[in-house]
Amino acid sequence: MSDVASPPSPTALPSADTTTEATKTTATTSGVELYAERRDVVVVRVDGELWDLDREIPAGHVVEPVTIGEPDGLAVLRHSAAHVLAQAVQQVNPDAKLGIGPPVTDGFYYDFDVETPFTPEDLKALDKIMGRIIKEGQTFRRRVVTEDEARAELAGEPYKLELIGLKGSSAEAGEGADVEVGAGELTIYENVRGAGRESETVVWKDLCRGPHLPSTRLIGNGVQLQRSAAAYWRGSEKNPMLQRVYGTAWPSKDELKAYLERLAEAERRDHRRLGSEMDLFSFPDEIGSGLAVFHPKGGVIRNAMEEYSRQKHIEGGYEFVYSPHITKEKLYQVSGHLDWYAEGMYPPMHLDEELDDDGTVRKPGQNYYLKPMNCPMHNLIFDARGRSYRELPLRLFEFGTVYRYEKSGVVHGLTRARGFTQDDAHIYCTREQMKDELTGTLNFVLDLLKDYGLEDFYLELSTRDPEKSVGSDEAWDEATRTLEEVATASGLDLVPDPEGAAFYGPKISVQAKDAIGRTWQMSTIQLDFNLPEKFDLQYTADDGSRQRPVMIHRALFGSIERFFAVLLEHYAGAFPAWLAPVQVKAVPVADAFDDYLADVVTRLKAQGIRAEVDYSDDRFGKKIRNAAKEKVPFTLIAGGEDVEAGAVSFRFRDGTQENGVPVADAIERIVGAVRDRVQV
RNA sequence: GCCGCCUUAGCUCAGUCGGUAGAGCGUCUCACUCGUAAUGAGAAGGUCAUCAGUUCGAUUCUGAUAGGCGGCUCCA
């Protein structure tokens, strides 16, 4: 209890603490006996595996207590909540067939096959029934069954039967299925009312590997159903759709409240909401789904983002190129994109076809595609003339706008659009240069992300999917190994993403945490031996031989639109001064001071500051309110006192003020904040 | 693409058990205006997403389409 202030979290619990709590059993016992004094212990970890508290533990095992507040305990709480939900559903509708019901981040879900989907009213009713089950303090009772017994008992549950058939290969069963059937013995959990009393009754049961809380009562403090939605059985669109009910569950009411507040905060920051409130961008129906227009204020932000990036890329040794938005089909046949991603591309335009009067084709014409990727174009630039080893690494950069025909259900504001601009670069280098170049690129990327105000990163290494890739094992192995070495050397955490790579090469992606703790995939760096092969790219080496370059694909923002959205949500609209659409709003105390402030604004503009005077006929208080709502970083105020002193007064976004600052000092301060890209 | 829900003024939303509609904010006009988040009055603004059907009559009921939202699948 040395650090009572810090909340329990996986990283805050030093392993030393856990081991000191571990006990080795010397006789048959149970978690209930071992931790009779510890009301916060809900399950035990026996030789690393979670067990129910009342399960008999033979001698010779290492046992640790697991509390409801730590990650394993929370998962058990949420899984038990999922059971109560399923029990409630089958109480209302005995014909509902059970899918799976695992814990997920912050909550749980359970999938059901029901005739009619759940309505919001259904969820309210289910919440009530769950409340009753919870209050009864039902017990979860574990029972080991043979496969035949399980089949007999669950004869009415086709999905559970399917899972039994897949036992031992839970990876195949689909995400979350391992909470129902594990690799070991099959178990059924019964929900018992009045356990231990003569009147005890089994009111519900489910195939489940457990473990569960000792009593449903422990769920009661912080459970809430959230929404229902459809989900494919076992995650495949070839399978039937089940109805999924999502809920959240916490050990206490306060934690539930804090979680709901986090959701509300995320909603307030939603870039789609802020985008229209702050007049930054919109998605006119007339243009089409997933195609944004940027309004002047959004344009200012975007321009500042791009301009800084451009400057940094020039300093970083990149050369700027431009390429068209459409191209003949052949290019994407050569690159292989049409083989892999034709579904995600806008359908082709068939051009230049000529017909005779009778309708027969005189000239066949050809297909043009809107470009979904820039790399083939950059390869053509590389290949426009003979290349020497002296030119390498050759770094080609483009703000390249691409179009992808995203499925209608996935389009989401600026974060998943159908037209977007990549800050895309392709680096051509020798095999010897590859590692240094990757290291340099990763550092470049991280430094630049930090300049935009993101600070907390980890890396993900996406490796080959044998089903969806081209190229030799040797090339993939070398590429993957190199990326891993570079990623490890960065010192950042590296999380594996098996089979997550694109068809042509493995990738490192940079994941960034935003101001409210959400992670976003930002930059990607991909190593590619395959496209240079397909395009037959070559350079002349110092010995006169022809060699194949290696290609590095990297995008830093990924998509400018998406990065814009992430920053907008990260800052909740209150951008640092260098990005803010209006950096200074000058508010006269009365219109007699308009001219005085107009002069200050002129001087600011001369220094490149985006400043304006509020000439509206609103009263002073209203003008302050408007400036605050616009989230302008600097509100400059002038009244009689300021004019007399040749000064202005600052009002900052947090409401604090600094009065009587000499005009020259005020200007210097603002210019400095913009130049140094600091948040104010 | 699949499942469900939604679409009323520029924005946020009321409302009509079928008889063509309201508020707040914003916009415009007028008056007011001296110190840190809302001065007052007035005005304009809507074929109630679109197209069909039912009906004497549809914004309201039914269907289709488009767009949005929440998930699932997908994401070079």
Image (cartoon, coloured by chain):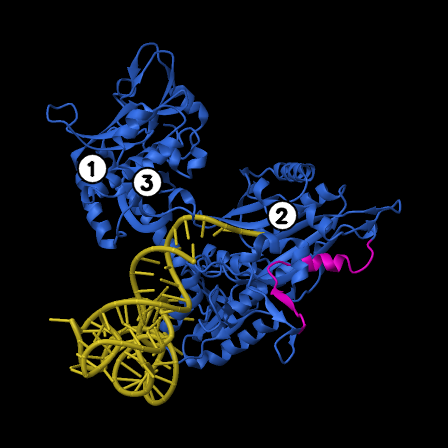
Chain colours: A blue, B yellow
Cα separation between marks 1 and 2: 49 Å
Depth check: give the residue in front, A362 or A567. A362
Return the x and y of residue A635 as percentages of the image width and height: 46, 67
Read off the residue under disc 3. Answer: A99
Q: In which quarter of the image is the N terminus of chain A?
A: top left
Instruction: Describe the element under mark 1 as helix, strand or loop.
Output: helix
Amino acid carrying label 2: it is Ile
Q: Residue A134 carries which label?
A: 1
Q: Which residue is drawn at 83% across and 52% down?
A: A388
Q: Which residue lies furthest to the front in this view?
A: A358
Q: Are marks 2 and 3 on the same chain?
A: yes
Q: Disc 3 vs disc 1: which is toward the camera?
A: 3
- Quick check: A516 above or below A599? above
Return the x and y of residue A74 as percentages of the image width and height: 34, 35
Q: What stretch is highlighted in magenta?
A: A362-387
Q: Do labels 3 and 1 share a chain?
A: yes
- Name the chain under label 3: A
- Quick check: A595 above or below A14? below
Q: Earlier in the sequence, mark 3 or mark 1?
A: 3
Q: Which residue lies furthest to the left in this view?
A: A199
Amino acid carrying label 1: it is Ile
Read off the residue under disc 2. Answer: A525
Q: Residue A547 carries which label?
A: none
Cα separation between marks 3 and 1: 22 Å
Depth check: give the residue in front, A481 or A311. A481
Instruction: Describe the element under mark 3 as helix, strand or loop.
Output: loop
Q: Earlier in the sequence, mark 1 or mark 2?
A: 1
- Name the chain under label 1: A
- Quick check: A213 above or below A364? above
Return the x and y of residue A338 as percentages of the image width and height: 61, 56
Q: In this view, does A460 lie to the left or right of A255?
A: right
